[in-house]
Image: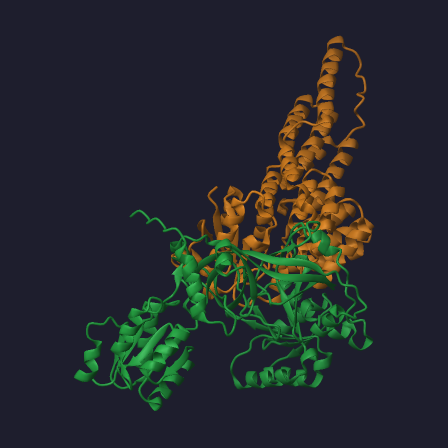
Chain colours: A orange, B green
Amino acid sequence: MDWTCLLVDLSGLGLAQTWQDQTAGHDYGMAISCASSLEEAQAMLNAGSVLVQAFFASENGGDLQTLLKSFQTNVGCISDFQAIICDEPSPVFMAGVFEFGIEQFVPMATWAKELAVVTRRAVELMQDETSPEFKTLSLSRSIRSADQGAIKQASDAIGDMATYDYRLAFAKGKAAEASGNYAAAADAYASARGMNKMFRPSASSLGETLLVTGRLDEALDVFKTLEKTNPYDVERKANLASVYVEKGDFEMAQRYVDAAAKIAPNNSKVLEAQAQVMLCTGKVGEAFKLMDGMSDVGPFFAAKLNELGIQLSQSGKGKSALALYQKAHKIVRPELKYKITLNAALACRRLKAWDMAMKYALRCEKEFGASFAKLDKIKESIIVSKKQEAAAAAQGAPKVPLPTDKAG
Amino acid sequence: MAIISPTITQHTIVLCIEKRERGIATQAMLTKAGFRVVMALSLYDALKCIAQEMPHLVISEVILSDGTAGTLYDRLQAHEMLKKTPIMAHVLKKTKEELTPLSTRKFAGFFLGPFEPRGFLAKVYEVIRAHAAVSPYFLDAESLGIKTDLTISIDAAVMGRAGEQMVSRSGTEVDPAASMVCVPASPDFGPAVLRMATNLRSGDEIFNMFPISRIIGAGRKWVLNLPEFKIGADASKGPEKLKKVVFYEPNEARYEGFRELLKGYGIDLVHAKTLPMATAMVKRDFETIGCVYLHELMNDASSIEWKGVYAKLPGGRKPPLIVGTTSQNARSTTETRYLKRPFGMGVFVEMLQASFERADDIASVAGKNAATTTASVSVKYQAPAILIGLDETGGILQVRFPLLKGSRLNIAHAFLQTAWEGRAQVQVVASAPTEAKPDIWHARFEAIDAGMSKVKYWEKLAKHLATLPPVPAKPAA
């Protein structure tokens, strides 16, 4: 595989003009590419050849956060493959990137030389298929593809290494999360956190998973502990807001939402928390509007949207439910899309739009990577119901209620 | 052959002069420039010194009390072992008497005219670079046909855990940047990769601490089950008191930022806006301070004052010192732990946390009559290395991390163990990163103990080298 080291200039240094001169004469072991905007960098990351990412940045802006998340999704939570190039980072900036496990800072004067050390090491690790970094990358790729078969295969390949390597325990948690097994994900994150208390991503993900599984007090405990060591993290404030919403303490929730919105009003997670507060306080229309600004929505809010869709469908507002699912499908993480599609298929079935229901069922199968028992049953019921309806219409008989009408 | 960092060899120069007073200034200047200088006042003296010292360069005045530089040249040429020694002739006057002995002989260099420090030193550097960058005796391992891959190891005994640190006892300090595999002697325990070492010294004992959170590998399982040391239970040194850090940082905003964030980790920062303020604080309250962080330590008056005050603090009770630096080559010791700036938050927090452990406390736990049980798991810290070459005292290794001066290493290498007659331990005398790749380090080691004869060592080694089969010549490109 031809790997790339992506240089991202978020400091406005005009690196696009000078990086080639600065990197000349150094042995990186991989290609070097430079991006000066979020879109450019995002496209490179999504293309799949980026192995090392280095930022020229001195503050913890939204673009940096987005790209760090994107790297985590596309490559994995491998902090050794990422570096920040700046001279005297502020403590708040240091704490901000530490939330992603990043501790590697490189001074401006020697960046070209020192980055070569990072890239050469990364290439070496990728040549060793037994290395934790290689396994992490494989697993991240499979999660990104959302193919459940591939996720299982990559997760199994980790073997017992997850019992002694916190990075692999964390990656295994992500795989369990992508397969919808949140209890196993929580266990994996807790194990990663136990192995390395300083590895912040495991603690943050543990809190989020506990929130999804409804273990609210434990989630609150995790988030509050993290908040003490970095009170500037926007997403944690949003998570704390979500916990308080779930606990029914809307006042505290709003307080955290306001605090988060003050720092980063357009952050997707902040919008999620805001929308969640709105949904719980009956402002559904406003919550819908906020969804336009969201991206990479995680399992917690995705579950909330699924719940709301089912409620709408069951109360006879099938078309509204479908509109919600359509919107939700655009903003959730790839591995969560199949659930939205499955619910859309069920909503169509309730509307007796058989062809549309079957179309959604087939899309669900494609997104999941394979068929599964529940989906097979739904497909069968759509075919049977369609046949029954056609037969009844031919005989002019009154409509018989379907056995699956109570389902979402 | 790999390009060897020139800074790792301290070159020995034999200075042959007719009159002592002429040599004193030269000797002082060369010593100041980092050379080891041995003075010889006659040809006889010079030949004796050269045979003992195996110098990297001989600087000789042409006319000596009992001969000439030409005679010296001829005598060295006649000696199989010493004939590679470069000789730089110092021609004081361009007279026939001085020039005749130089003709028909291949001297490594000449310096003409009376002694002039700058030009003379430049010439010495030039000759050393050209003839003895490492040593005139240096033999490239690859061209000798001996295996270049080897394993270096350090013997240690893992004792237990102190807070979030694994504590071991070894005879050597481990560089914080080193990454080594800890291989237990017992097959029941798995190996683990150790990083971010902190070294503590109590008397002659050296303790290495490694943050458990950074340990990876199957060995984590047994590390987590190590007995915990109860350190700091003494009320007078409660753990809360030990977490006070004197924080010298000229930028007040940065200090405020760190203060707020580190509070969450249970670390209390006390601001010293200037170095004299930090000096005064430490002088006054050193017993209640857990650690001192200095943003930088220069060579100015306030830094000198700091060093003086810190040096006078009682050994076992002085707070550990962390110094921020932008230098690539600053190497931590038990006294001063260097932290390369810019650094990451986790590294900083873990370094501060490790600094709250005291060498004397650990030593008392590890002592024979201590109440606490220690694990005493025999281990080896191992790392792969490449043998670059051999010389008159040892040789040069290539490793992926810095090795500290004075480290005692075991070398597993079939040929060397035979040549060294079963001996496997060497001592690191210097190490430096290579110019082109800062992640590749060259370490110079000595395989001879103090007082041992270089000549005998080299003769024995040469005998073994002679038994090696000839290396087939590489085909021309």
Residue at image x 25%, y 77%?
B70
Residue A298 in picture, x, y percent from top left:
68, 44
Residue B263 in picture, x, y percent from top left:
72, 68
Q: What count of labels does the image hold? A: 0
Question: In this view, which residue lies farthest toward the bottom?
Answer: B21
Quadrant (top left, top right, bottom left, bottom right) of the N terminus of chain B: bottom left
Q: Does B352 appear above or below B101?
A: above
Q: Does A269 appear above or below A145?
A: below
Q: Is residue B1 left or right of residue B107?
A: right
Question: In this view, which residue lies farthest toward the top?
Answer: A395
Q: Is residue A106 visible?
A: yes
Residue at image x 51%, y 54%?
B414
Q: Does B109 appear above or below A239?
A: below
Residue A110 in picture, x, y percent from top left:
46, 64
Q: Is residue B190 left or right of residue B66?
A: right
- Seen from the viewer's position, the closer of residues A251 and B401 is B401
- Seen from the viewer's position, the closer of residues A271 and B442 is B442
Q: Is residue A298 visible?
A: no
Q: Does B293 appear above or below A217?
A: below
Residue at image x 76%, y 42%?
A183
Q: Which of the 4 quarters of the picture holds residue B339?
A: bottom right
Residue A201 in picture, x, y percent from top left:
67, 53
Question: In this view, which residue lies farthest toward the left?
Answer: B96
Q: Which of the 4 quarters of the picture holds residue B284?
A: bottom right
- Seen from the viewer's position, the closer of residues A81 and A370 is A81
Q: Is residue A250 left or right of residue B87?
A: right
